[in-house]
């Protein structure tokens, strides 16, 4: 397992990264701004000075159907492990669970996984996420270049999963 340090992105992290990977650092400035606006927490997994994974922890679901049926609770979006099968994804999910419980007193956490993403689905099921009974959700997200311009809009069908967070 690759032990990583996971923390919300900070200006200090972006400044340090600019010297090494200017493209990545620039792409993350809007994330920092959104985090500072209170839209979400942008959690980055660091191995020494290198970012090896990231997740957006939204404070409410991106999916109107989910909000309508289940109400407001945090949701993991854009989970990526740059280094695969070394436990980075698992540690990021655990960090999201912790931050959601500690900062929002959340009792539930959601995530959507593309219908054909079997390995991600296995990982979430193993961590206790279970599919909801509300049918597939339709996800849309923009891929952007280093200057923030949209290069492609992705659309995919997802299975929505939730996990109960036990506190105390
Ligand atoms: C999905 C994703 C985030 C998982 O991250 P990861 O860091 O590879 O996940 P982990 O290493 O924690 O666990 C994944 C697998 O590795 C195994 N694993 C965990 N630690 C391990 C270790 N030390 N050595 C070997 N295998 C390990 C797990 O058992 C799991 O096995 P599985 O194939 O049966 O599921 C990553 O594959 C990814 O970025 N995918 C592309 C983007 C994506 O699909 N994101 C999900 C959007 S919902």
Image (cartoon, rainbow, N blue to C red):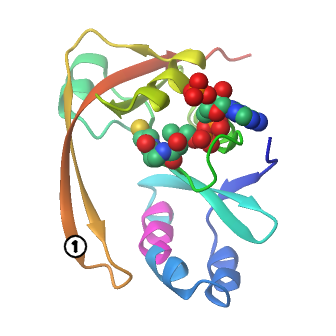
In the rendered image, residue 82, in percent from the top left (x then y), is placed at 58, 56
Ligand 1 within 8 A of label 1's CB? no
In the rendered image, residue 52, in percent from the top left (x then y), is placed at 65, 59
Query: Is 42 in front, or is 23?
Result: 23
Query: Is 144 in front, or is 72?
Result: 144
Q: Quadrant of residue 58?
A: top left
- Majority secondary structure of magenta residues: helix
Q: Which residue is drawn at 36% across and 29% down?
A: 72
Q: In this view, does 44 lie above or below 135?
A: below
In the rendered image, residue 80, in percent from the top left (x then y), is placed at 51, 50
Q: Which residue is drawn at 71% across and 83% down?
A: 16
Question: Which quarter of the rendered picture does the C terminus lie within?
Answer: top right
Query: Does the magenta-highlighted stretch encompass residue 137?
Result: no
Q: Is mark 1 on a helix, strand or loop?
A: strand
Question: Which quarter of the rendered picture does the N terminus lie within?
Answer: top right
- Looking at the rendering, the stretch of residues picked out in magenta corresponds to 28-35
> Is residue 67 something one can see in this rendering?
yes
* Residue carrying label 1: 150
Query: Is 160 in front, or is 166?
Result: 160
Q: From the viewer's perspective, is 112 left or right of 98?
A: left
Query: Does the magenta-highlighted stretch encompass residue 33?
Result: yes
> Is residue 93 something one can see in this rendering?
no
Mark 1 neighbour density, 10 Å: few (under 14) some (14–19) many (20 or more): few
In the rendered image, residue 68, in percent from the top left (x then y), is placed at 20, 23
* Residue at the far bottom in the pictured view: 19
Ligand 1 lies in which image quarter? top right
């Amino acid at each position: 397992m690759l032990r990583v340090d996971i923390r919300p992105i900070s200006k200090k992290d972006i400044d340090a990264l600019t010297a090494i990977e200017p493209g990545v650092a620039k792409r993350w400035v809007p994330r920092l701004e959104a985090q500072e606006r209170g839209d979400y927490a942008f959690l980055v997994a660091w191995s020494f000075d290198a970012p090896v994974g990231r997740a957006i922890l939204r404070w409410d679901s991106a999916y109107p159907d989910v909000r309508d049926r289940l109400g407001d609770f945090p949701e993991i979006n854009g989970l990526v492990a740059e280094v695969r099968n070394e436990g980075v994804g698992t540690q990021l999910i655990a960090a999201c669970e912790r931050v959601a419980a500690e900062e929002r007193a959340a009792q539930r956490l959601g995530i959507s996984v593309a219908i054909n993403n079997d390995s991600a689905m296995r990982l979430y099921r193993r961590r206790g996420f279970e599919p909801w009974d509300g049918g597939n959700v339709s996800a849309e997200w923009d891929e952007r270049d280093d200057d923030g311009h949209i290069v492609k809009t992705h659309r995919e069908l997802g299975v929505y999963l939730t996990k109960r967070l036990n506190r105390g």
